[in-house]
Image (cartoon, grey):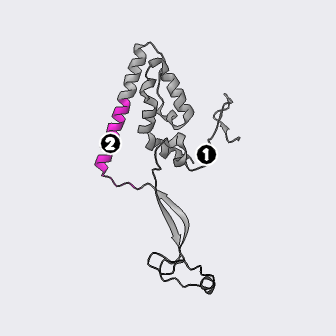
Amino acid sequence: MGLGWDEDAETKRRHYRRFYPDELENISEIMGDKKSPFNSYDLKRGQARGAKVSFWAKLTNSVKTDASGSATDEKIVGRFKAVIEVEAKDEKKAYFTRKHELIDELVANLRELAKNRDIKDFDLDLESLESMEGRMAMRQSMEPLGVNHLEVVKRLADIESDIILKRMLLKS
């Protein structure tokens, strides 16, 4: 499907958008085995108790009742999804500070390992974790380091999953 565009006029390399047939939280290559991060609530329409029963509903014995036995004409008309977070600002700031420190330390250690093994032009682009192709490329670039058995890319993707999901939702 030709959804791409040229990033620049010189290279003639097209950048393609990715089409997903379902919500991003249901796509395993994005979320992995994690459950959806969203809180979901049914949106209902109608009267839950004391609804007036129509003549036709009485005639056909299709009167809907709720748990208390009262007539209801309530229907589910949609779904509301949201991420609801209750947190202290200081704790959140401390969490993100520590998270960035750990990632920076990991990247520095991997660069030092690459330097010790005489691997030039080693770089980790954390934005490439958004796609499976980017993760595969990162795994291949780390192969000469001999650390793929540690599943560094998978762990980085897990750590960055909140940021990756936010970026992908903002793009769509």
In the rendered image, the residue lying farthest to the top is: 118
The three-letter amino acid code for the residue at tag 1 is: Tyr
Give the residue furthest to the front.
61
- Using a 10 Å C-alpha cutoff, classify the residue at mark 2 as few (fewer than 14 neighbours), some (14 to 19) or many (20 or more): few
Which x, y percent locates residue 64?
54, 77
Q: Is residue 59 left or right of residue 39?
A: right
Total label count? 2
Nearer the observer, disc 2 or disc 1?
1
**SS at badge 1:** loop
Disc 1: CA contacts within 10 A as few (<14), some (14-19) or many (>=20): few
Residue 89 on the magenta segment: yes
- The x and y percentages for residue 93 are 32, 44
Residue at the image point whose x is 44% and y is 12% from the top:
118
Residue 78 in percent (x, y) is at 55, 64
| Residue found 40% across the figure and 56% down from its top | 84
- Based on the displayed image, in which of its 4 quarters is residue 6 positioned? top right
Eyeballing the image, is 119 above or below 62? above
Mark 1 highlights which residue? 20
Is 139 placed above or below 36 here?
above
Q: Quadrant of the N terminus?
A: top right
Residue annotated with mark 2 = 95
Q: Earlier in the sequence, mark 2 or mark 1?
A: 1
Give the residue drawn at x 49%, y 58%. Answer: 81
At a point 63% along the width and 82% down the height, the residue shown is 60
Residue 163 appears left or right of 19? left
Q: Main secondary structure of the magenta part?
A: helix
Residue at the right extreme of this rendering: 2
